[in-house]
Amino acid sequence: MWQFFHKLGSPRWFYGIANRFMPWFLVIGLALTLTGIVWGLAFAPKDYLQGNSYRIIFIHVPTAFLAQSVYVMMAVAAVVTLVWRMKLADVFVKSVAPVGAVLTFLALFTGAVWGKPTWGTWWIWDARLTSMLILLFLYFGVIALAAAISDEKSSARAVAVLVLVGVVNIPIIQYSVEWWNTLHQPSTFKLTEKPTMPVEMWLPLLLVVLGLYLLFGWLACYRVQTEILWRERRTQWVKSLIQPRGVA
């Protein structure tokens, strides 16, 4: 286990192992996501209260779920950065922060689209909505801080501290509907509890969630690989990757 952990900190080793998994992540992720979305939007039954407007959950719930998960992953990588000083952990944080920001924006936007017919308004300073907006600002803060500090070591430490400070917002998002009286409904989908929806609704939702996680895995590997090539561009192993065949 520890041997694998230390190997994971090697940019060259990670670059090679990522190449093996990325095609699988992409193909299976696309298949699951498209199947779930088509099933949910075209074939799942209407909700007895919300009618067809509920179908936005097949985009809103997976993006909101993944947006929070990405930040938790960043927090774990931030601990690795501060404790074990692994450069790859810092690369991961800075590579996936823009992805997390896009996911959070999509969750907020689709939530607003859902909220209009459900609550009669695009936005309200509800506890769940406000804490998700704070998550978006945290992602922006990580991106801005990473770009503002040129020294890699100082940047890695500063970004890691900011990520760990901001992770307190994740349980607030999760339990906001239980701690406060809010308009936002309780979580539609929980992995630890039996779904309250019929199988025709929750199964396509589960497919989209799993598919998006795999697509995130592919995109994260791609972005991390790109950053590795830039940081390691002067090393021999990277030069051998980009060297044209037949050139000594």
Image (cartoon, grey):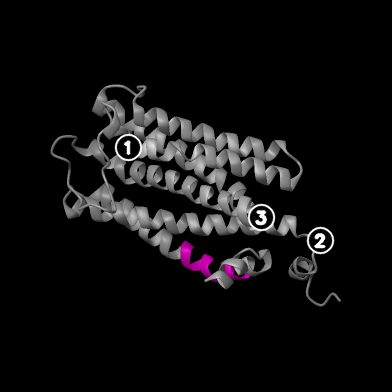
Q: Residue 112: in sight, yes or no?
A: no
Most extreme residue toward the right is 248
- Residue at (18, 48) in percent of width and height: 197
Q: Is residue 116 left or right of residue 101?
A: left
Q: Secondary structure at mark 1?
A: helix
Q: Earlier in the sequence, mark 3 or mark 1?
A: 3
Question: Which amino acid, by three-letter code, is at mark 1?
Answer: Tyr
Q: Quadrant of residue 206?
A: bottom left
Instruction: Say what amino acid the circle numbered 2 marks.
Output: Arg
| Circle 3 Cα neighbour tier, 10 Å, few/some/many (<14 / 14–19 / ≥20) | some
Inspect this view and state whether residue 23 appears.
yes
Which residue is found at the position 43% from the left and 55% from the top? Answer: 213
Q: Nearer the viewer, residue 5 or 69?
A: 5
Q: Give the labeled residue for mark 3.
A: 85
Q: Position of residue 146 (x, y in %)?
A: 66, 40
Is disc 2 in contact with disc 3, using a CB cutoff of under 8 Å?
Answer: no
Quadrant in which the C terminus appears: bottom right
Query: Nearer the observer, disc 3 or disc 1?
Result: 3
Of the two numbered discs 2 and 3 in the rendering, the one whose residue sits closer to the viewer: 3
Magenta region includes residue 23: yes
Q: Specify whether 43 is left or right of 126.
A: left
Q: Dot 1: within a 10 Å radius of its alpha carbon, few (fewer than 14), some, or many (20 or more) residues? A: some
Tell me residue 122's x, y (percent): 35, 24
Q: Which residues are magenta?
A: 16-26
Q: Secondary structure at mark 3?
A: loop
The spot of residue 125 in percent (x, y) is: 37, 22
| Residue linked to disc 1 | 175
Q: Earlier in the sequence, mark 2 or mark 3?
A: 3
Q: CA distance from mark 3 to mark 1?
A: 33 Å
- Circles 3, 1 touching at the beta carbon (< 8 Å): no
Quadrant for residue 174, please give it: top left
Cα separation, mark 2 vs mark 3, equals 21 Å
